[in-house]
Image: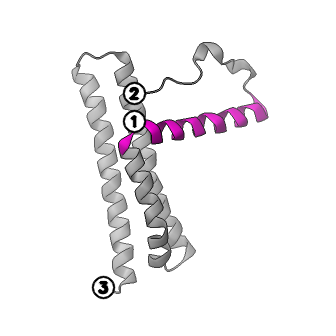
Amino acid sequence: MDPAPETDQEFDKSANTGFRHLVNATRFSYLGLVAALKNESAFRQEAALAILLIPVGVWIAGSATEFVLLMAVTMLVMVVELINSAIEAAIDRIGPERHLLSGLAKDYGSAAVMLTLVIAAMVWMVMLLEHLAII
């Protein structure tokens, strides 16, 4: 995994206010997305699936609100995956030795991703079945 482009020692938090804060937050968010796409295979898979689901969502959705709902649950999976990856990176930063609490933290993050995938699948399935007039 690539190290962060800036360390806490190089970043002056006291000068990070107002518009400068917005610029920095946007830049750090962009760097986080690029790093996730580069280093996290699950995030790459979810991003690819999200791109493929956009036209499917346009076809399934009966309204703009339904389309936004489909895209929101799809992006929620990606958000939770990013949080899971952050937990894993922090645990791995602590050290390579195995510890019960480290394992639990990683398992909890993984479980959160799985539950989010189940939620997204349920929403997509109901919307698809409604679109096909099955339910």
Task: Kindly check if marks 3 and 1 are in contact, taking CB atoms under 8 A apart as contact.
Answer: no
Task: Kindly check if marks 2 and 3 are in contact, taking CB atoms under 8 A apart as contact.
Answer: no
Where residue 106 sits, quadrant-wise, is top left
Which of the numbered marks, if any, corresponds to residue 68?
none
Left or right, 93 with reference to 98: right
Q: What element carries label 3?
A: loop
Q: What residue would you read off at disc 3?
A: 134
Question: Given this view, does label 3 or label 1 mark the residue nearer the observer?
Answer: 1
Which of the numbered marks, if any, corresponds to residue 89?
2
Quadrant containing the C terminus is: bottom left
Q: What residue would you read off at disc 1?
A: 85
Which is nearer the N-term, disc 2 or disc 3? Answer: 2
Question: For the magenta stretch, what is the residue range?
Answer: 17-41
Crowding at mark 2 (Cα within 10 Å: few <14, some 14-19, many 20+)? few
Distance from disc 2 to disc 3, alpha carbons, whole Å, reads 44 Å
Kind of residue at disc 2: Ala
Left or right, 103 with reference to 20: left
| Residue 17 vertical placement versus 64 (above, below) | above
> Which residue corresponds to the image point at 47% horizontal and 26% vertical from the top-left?
2
Crowding at mark 3 (Cα within 10 Å: few <14, some 14-19, many 20+)? few
Quadrant containing the N terminus is: top left
In the rendering, at what x and y percent does residue 25 appear?
Answer: 65, 35
Left or right, 16 with reference to 78: right
In the rendering, at what x and y percent does residue 70 appear?
Answer: 46, 66
The one of 24 and 64 positioned closer to us in this rendering? 24
Task: Kindly check if marks 2 and 1 are in contact, taking CB atoms under 8 A apart as contact.
Answer: yes
> Which residue corresponds to the image point at 47% horizontal and 78% vertical from the top-left?
59
Residue 28 part of the magenta-drawn span: yes
Where residue 7 sits, quadrant-wise, is top right
